[in-house]
Image (tube, rainbow, N blue to C red):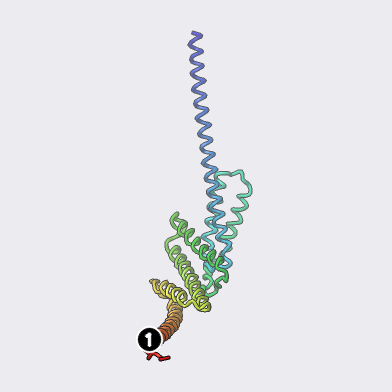
Amino acid sequence: MVFSIVIILIVALIVVAIVVNAIQQHREKVEAEKRTEIAKQKSVIDETENVLLTIETIPVSPKMVQILYRRVLNALKIMQQLNPTQTDIKQRIRDAESKINSIDIEQPAPPHESFVLPENDKLIIQYIQAIKKFRILLRSEHSKGKVDTQSFVNEDRMLAALQLRVNVETLARRATSAIQSEMLGSARQYFEKAIAALAAQPQQTDYIIHRKAQLEEQLHGIQDIMRNANAEDRAKKREAERDELDELFAPKKKW
């Protein structure tokens, strides 16, 4: 009898140990998943806030700014649910809500003509990367149902137009620099790339039409210079060949 009780107690202890271990493992798994999700939301916030730092130099619409602040707010709310005891999250949520409420989305976006292309190539690359990042985040919010389709289309179209403008103006500047360095072949290639980018756009805006005409005129000027230079080279070559023939068939002098 006593032996049976001992066996039962041992089995019970083993079962309890297994249950406790299972509970502990489950808790550790839940905590690990929570930490992973919190880290993910922190990454979302950092990524979005870094992009928001560029709104002073990139002419994006108030609607786009609001979309990004809402992205930050949603991430903060998820973090609060995962870790309700973190006090600073509440203040950050209030700050984000206040910022969103202060944005007048009826205000038009700054005109693209207001943007100034940076002088430094490194800054231009950062500028283009920032615009691409805006489009990636906008697409992400749309795919999650946070942005309606019409807003997505309107905002992405404006960003695409800005990206095109930056690309074209960068190529035009490089072409001008190549001309100054007497690298006409490179200048021609830059002009051709810029014109092709403008011609490929399905919607021909005033900027595209006028800029394309300007660049084509500059390209024609380059082509005329190169044709004239080639003609001069050919004339010089023919003259040199003729001199050689004259010398070859000239009467030999008798000494």
Indicate the position of residue 92 as horizontal and vertical percent values: 61, 53
Disc 1: which residue: 248
Query: In which quadrant of the rendered image does the C terminus lie?
Result: bottom left
For this orientation, the residue located farthest to the front is: 255
Indicate the position of residue 226 as horizontal and vertical percent values: 43, 81
Residue in the foreground of this view, choosing between 200 and 195: 195
Q: Quadrant of residue 110?
A: bottom right
Q: Residue at x 37, y 91 (%)?
A: 251
Q: Residue at x 60, y 54 (%)?
A: 94
Residue in the foreground of this view, choosing between 17 and 168: 168
For residue 247, side relative to residue 10 (left or right): left
Residue in the foreground of this view, choosing between 177 and 29: 177
Indicate the position of residue 68 as horizontal and vertical percent values: 53, 59
Indicate the position of residue 14 as horizontal and vertical percent values: 50, 21
For residue 252, side relative to residue 141 (left or right): left
Figure check: 26 above or below 196: above
Q: Quadrant of residue 81?
A: top right
Q: Quadrant of residue 95?
A: bottom right
Please state which amino acid type lies under the numbered disc 1: Leu
Q: Residues within 10 Å of mark 1 (few under 14, many from 20)?
A: few
For label 1, the SS is helix
Figure check: 20 above or below 36: above
